Image (cartoon, rainbow, N blue to C red):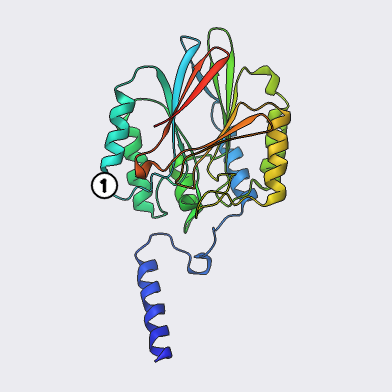
């Protein structure tokens, strides 16, 4: 009886996996590239492109932040509602998609990328989540590009900085951490500094923040020492708003549950609104 059940389970697993493109059976339970390799590929991509930069006509502007879309191969009602809100407003400059855009299948990745590009004229910026690494990191990388990079927003009187970090494996890794430290040495050149990364820091329900404790507290100190304005994450599918060492940590609810956020910047002041 046990042998029959085992055979059936193995057969079912193989059938599920065989329906997915680019599956490496030996690597099903972990990503095919470690975090340092992914970081190096992202930085190489950055070097081949112009720096990300946007210009705001006024010192008051905003941007949308969402995560955990988990798109498949059709446009769901929650995405239609999100874009109704985005396209009915004229004050925002861009959209941040903070990981778990799809669930790993190449066809889903193609559908997700094409859909997000078509639904709004606003520039879109992405970083990878754990679901985006299922089966094959290159599925994400080939479509969405770098997952570690910077974005500068230039206004008439100041420049703001967004730092996109890849934490899909619940760690930044040594190379990405060193890069982060180097970028933050220039923090005083910017008015606001926001960090975007998928994995949340605070314990929340089932999907807890899963940075190792030492790394998490090292990042708390690093962000506090450099007066980072705020850190945005997702992953937990639950809203959260905490302050650590003077830095605000905001976790958006999942867009698949109709939840997202809006940042509004007005000179030296900024506001966050859960949607």
Position of residue 264 measured from the top left corner of the image (x, y, whole percent)? 47, 20
Q: Quadrant of residue 268?
A: top right
Q: Is residue 178 left or right of residue 241?
A: right
Q: Secondary structure at mark 1?
A: loop
Q: Is residue 141 above or below residue 192?
A: below
Q: Residue at x 49, y 42 (%)?
A: 234
Q: Residue at x 61, y 54 (%)?
A: 34
Q: How many marks?
A: 1
Q: Is residue 1 above or below residue 217?
A: below
Identify the residue under disc 1.
74
Q: Is residue 212 left or right of residue 263?
A: right
Quadrant into which the C terminus falls: top left
Q: Is residue 222 left or right of residue 78?
A: right
Q: Residue at x 47, y 40 (%)?
A: 239
**Looking at the image, which is closer to me, 37 or 253?**
253
Position of residue 190 measured from the top left corner of the image (x, y, whole percent)? 64, 18
Instruction: Classify 10 Å Cα crowding around label 1: few (below 14), some (14-19), many (20 and above).
Output: few
Q: Is residue 237 left or right of residue 86?
A: right
Q: Quadrant of residue 225?
A: top right
Q: Is residue 195 above or below residue 68?
A: above
Position of residue 273 measured from the top left corner of the image (x, y, whole percent)? 44, 27
Q: Quadrant of residue 217?
A: top right
Q: Is residue 57 above or below residue 225?
A: above
**Looking at the image, which is closer to me, 158 or 136?**
158
Q: Which residue is most to the bottom?
A: 1
Position of residue 13 measured from the top left corner of the image (x, y, whole percent)? 40, 72
Q: Residue at x 57, y 49 (%)?
A: 203
Quadrant into which the N terminus falls: bottom left
């Amino acid at each position: 009886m046990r042998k029959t059940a085992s055979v059936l389970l193995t057969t079912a697993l193989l059938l599920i996996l065989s329906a997915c493109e680019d599956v490496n059976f030996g690597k099903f339970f972990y990503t095919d590239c470690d975090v340092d390799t992914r970081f190096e590929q992202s930085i190489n991509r950055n070097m081949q492109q112009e720096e990300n930069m946007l210009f705001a006509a006024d010192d008051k502007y905003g941007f949308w932040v969402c995560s955990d879309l988990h798109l498949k191969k059709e446009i769901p009602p929650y995405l239609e509602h999100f874009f109704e809100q985005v396209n009915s407003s004229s004050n925002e400059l861009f959209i941040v998609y903070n990981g778990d855009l799809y669930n790993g299948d190449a066809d889903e990745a193609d559908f997700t990328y094409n859909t997000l590009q078509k639904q709004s004229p606003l520039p879109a910026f992405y970083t990878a989540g754990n679901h985006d690494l299922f089966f094959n990191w290159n599925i994400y990388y080939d479509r969405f590009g770098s997952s570690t990079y910077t974005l500068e927003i230039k206004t008439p009187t100041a420049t703001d900085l967004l730092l996109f970090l890849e934490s899909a494996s619940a760690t930044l890794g040594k190379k990405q951490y060193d890069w982060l430290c180097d970028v933050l040495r220039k923090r005083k050149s910017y008015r606001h500094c926001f960090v975007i990364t998928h994995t949340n820091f605070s314990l929340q329900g089932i999907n807890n923040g899963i940075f190792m404790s030492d790394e998490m507290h090292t990042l708390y100190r690093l962000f506090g020492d450099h007066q980072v304005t705020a850190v945005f994450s997702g992953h937990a599918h639950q809203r959260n708003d905490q302050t650590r060492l003077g830095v605000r940590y905001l976790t958006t609810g999942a867009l698949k549950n109709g939840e997202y956020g809006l940042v509004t910047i007005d000179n030296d002041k900024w506001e966050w609104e859960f949607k």
